[in-house]
Image (cartoon, grey):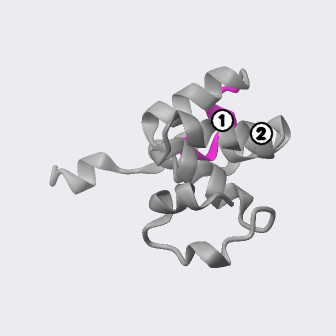
């Protein structure tokens, strides 16, 4: 992985990241925190299937990213782990009601 992507993995031992073994983590992290250059790197290094896999199975997305990927891959919210997780949250409990 290019050294200029290291800034997006501030809590990770960047040198130990494996582009293939850690692809879900890398793709979701760069989509959520990366710039346009990082997104282009993803598109050049991972397949649409890899990115769609993240869209379907990652709960660690930002709302804007989840919505973007949902539209890019023509997914329904019910098909995405992120939306299942958000819907399962009991917000009333956390609000003290």
Q: Main secondary structure of the magenta part?
A: helix
Tag 1 near tag 2, CB within 8 Å = yes
At mark 2, the secondary structure is helix
- In this picture, residue 37 sits left or right of residue 96: right
> Which residue is pictured at 52% across the width and 53% down the height?
60
- In this picture, residue 36 sits left or right of residue 41: left
Q: Which of the 4 image quarters holds residue 66?
A: top right
The circle drawn on residue 44 is 2
> Which residue is pictured at 57% across the width and 38% down the height?
37
- Residue 77 magenta: yes
The circle drawn on residue 40 is 1
Let me know if residue 52 appears in the view: no
At mark 1, the secondary structure is helix
The x and y percentages for residue 5 are 55, 56
Q: Nearer the viewer, residue 87 or 71?
A: 71
Residue farthest front in this picture = 3
Q: Is residue 15 above or below residue 62?
A: below
Q: Which of the 4 image quarters holds residue 93?
A: bottom left
Let me know if residue 22 appears in the view: yes
Q: Is residue 14 above or below residue 23?
A: below
Q: Is residue 58 above or below residue 56?
A: below
> Which residue is pictured at 66% across the width and 78% down the height?
16
The x and y percentages for residue 92 are 25, 47
> Which residue is pictured at 70% across the width and 26% down the height?
75
Q: Which residues are magenta?
A: 75-82
Q: Which of the 4 image quarters holds residue 68?
A: top right
Q: Is residue 1 above or below residue 30?
A: below
């Amino acid at each position: 992985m290019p050294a200029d992507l290291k800034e997006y993995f501030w809590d990770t031992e960047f040198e130990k990241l494996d582009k293939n073994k850690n692809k879900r983590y890398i793709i979701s992290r760069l989509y959520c925190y990366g710039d346009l250059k990082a997104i282009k790197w993803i598109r050049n290094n991972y397949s649409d299937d890899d990115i769609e896999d993240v869209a379907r199975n990652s709960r660690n997305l930002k709302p804007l990213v989840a919505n973007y990927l949902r539209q890019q891959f023509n997914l329904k919210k019910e098909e995405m782990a992120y939306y299942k997780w958000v819907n399962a949250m009991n917000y009333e409990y956390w609000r003290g009601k």
